Image (spheres, grey):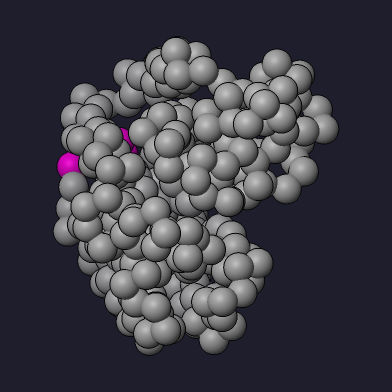
Amino acid sequence: MNALLNAPVAAPADASVSWVDRRAPAALRPFLRLARADRPIGFWLLLIPCWWSSALAAGMSANAGAPVALRALAFMALFAIGAVAMRGAGCTWNDILDRDIDGRVERTRLRPLPSGQVGLFGAFVFLGLQALVGLIVLICLPPFAIVVALSSLGVVVIYPLMKRVIWIPQLVLGLAFSWGALMGFAALLEQLPPAAFLLYAGSILWVVGYDTIYAHQDREDDEQVGLKSSARLLGTATRPWLAALYAGAVVLVGLALTSAHAGPLAYVGLIAFAAHLAQQVWRLDIDDRALCLTLFRSNRDAGLLLFAGIALAALLA
């Protein structure tokens, strides 16, 4: 333990060398790791549903011409800033609640809190600063979008506790990480049409699927410390369940595109998205931790393929 406490810039076991280790000031590195700035995949996965909904809502308002395109770009930029801040805040909150458990898991034992690189008070101050950035972004949105955004806070707060309570905590993560699928509609249209809820439901299934892949890295450790996860629940049956989750996601997103009267290129993006998810199912080996991490991270590319199709369809509209 003394060795850990005397290593203020040690990287956690679940992180590779990143820009944080190479370029960030030493004093800031533990806080940046607390926010997972060294692993931007979480930021992307939180942001992509925001961009899906923004592009789809812009396409629904295409008759407004250039003004709606500029508003969509402005909101997408705000969502990017908000995603960085709120993903960091969520990770900080998660680590505050899990600091004792993280110290007993090989992959997480060198995270800033369990290793002593950041104290509990410092973590709460850092959490408050990130929440302040999120608040600044929030007040730049229309009133209806502010209400929709605030409605997600309950789910965000309870998610870290769900692994102690239910066998599929990934479902609660899906509810939180998919909220952006509502936000583009709330900001641009100031309403939530049926397409918003279909897109949200599809995103939830996508999140449950990819986070189940991720959870297989911790399957044995979770069993030892008594935590629940979809990886432990499904075990060797993960592949068919993953196929079903991803198929459901594709169908629901397709229905959202139809409801929004999206153009043909949106469906090209959906086909590319579906093909990417299919190869994840095909390649999955739940006992290969490195492959599970690779497949999990590849969902950024899957999500961006779908976004590209929706965005191009909106531009042509």
Does 162 sit above or below residue 229?
above
Picture quarter with the C terminus: bottom left
Choose top left, top right, bottom left or bottom right for residue 90. top left
Choose top left, top right, bottom left or bottom right for residue 20. top right
Does 148 sit above or below residue 7?
below
Q: Which residue is found at the position 31% from the left and 72% from the top? A: 233
x and y, in percent, of residue 181 in the image: 32, 51
In magenta segment, residue 129: no
Choose top left, top right, bottom left or bottom right for residue 208. bottom left
Q: Secondary structure of the magenta portion, mostly?
A: loop
Decide which of 307, 19 is in the foreground and name it: 19
Left or right, 113 with respect to 239, comes to: right
Decide which of 32, 265 is in the foreground and name it: 32
Residue 53 visible in this rendered orientation of the protein: no
Magenta region = 187-191
x and y, in percent, of residue 87 in the image: 45, 36
Number of labelled discs? Answer: 0
Q: Which residue is found at the position 50% from the left and 14% from the top? A: 122
Residue at the outermost front position: 2
Decide which of 223, 133 is in the foreground and name it: 223
Left or right, 49 with respect to 11, comes to: left
x and y, in percent, of residue 34 in the image: 55, 31
x and y, in percent, of residue 135 in the image: 36, 19
Q: Which residue is found at the position 52% from the left and 77% from the top? A: 286
Does 255 sit above or below residue 37?
below
Residue 187 visible in this rendered orientation of the protein: yes
Residue at the outermost right position: 22
Q: Which residue is found at the position 21% from the left and 24% from the top? A: 143
